[in-house]
Image (tube, helix red, strand yellow):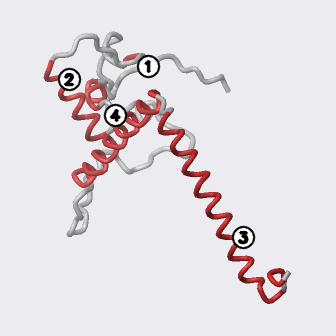
Amino acid sequence: MRFLRRRHMPLRLAVVGSAFVLFLFILQRDVSSREQATEKPWLKSLVSQKDHVLDLMLGAVNNLKDSIPKLQIRAPEPQGTLVSTKKSCLPGFYAPSELKPFWERPPQNPNSPGADGKAFQKNEWTALETQEKEEGYKKHCFNAFASDRISLQRALGPDTRPPE
């Protein structure tokens, strides 16, 4: 009964703590040996996919230094405005000539890639096109090949917003 005295409290705490740590160590070792024996094949495929995605992302991050704009030393030069700045009408009232667009839209081809909100689909790829697509994925993490082929002036299809 000498061991249960109050002055032996730090010693008792050390013995109980070491027994607990030893128990946790044995438990962890037993669980890890079981996991290695029953490793699942789907887990290996997930790890390989994760490594592939990480490689893509690291490649994109490394390519960011190419796309960072260079610092401009001089003051920016003002661009000439093509729009007339004189206002001949009161606010809210406009002449028909002022309501016309500045540039006429080029003729639309409904069969062009991405027209009318349709997806860009290409069934047959040449080796050069495939290489350009893969480089776009590697550098920008998206299909830059398709993005370059879709017209900026394409029609996006009918307006699906509810009427006001």
Please state the horizontal and vertical placement of residue 154, each as a whole percent of the image.
Answer: 36, 22
Q: Are marks 1 and 3 in contact (CB under 8 Å)?
A: no
Circle 3 residue: 16
Mark 1 vs 2: CB contact within 8 A: no
In the displayed structure, 95 sits above or below 60; it is: above
The residue singled out by tag 4 in the image is 142
> Which of marks 3 and 2 precedes in the sequence?
3
**Residue highlighted by disc 1:** 117
Badge 4: residue crowd in 10 Å (few <14, some 14–19, many ≥20) = some
Instruction: Name the N-terminal-most of marks 1 and 3.
Output: 3
Name the element at disc 2.
helix
Where is residue 46? Give x, y as percent: 44, 33
Element under disc 3 = helix
**What's the residue type where badge 1 is placed?**
Gly
Identify the mark at residue 130; answer none if there is no mark: 2
CA neighbours of label 1 inside 10 A, class few (<14), some (14 to 19), many (20+): few
Q: Nearer the viewer, residue 50 or 11?
A: 11
Q: Work out whether 105 lies above or below 73.
A: above
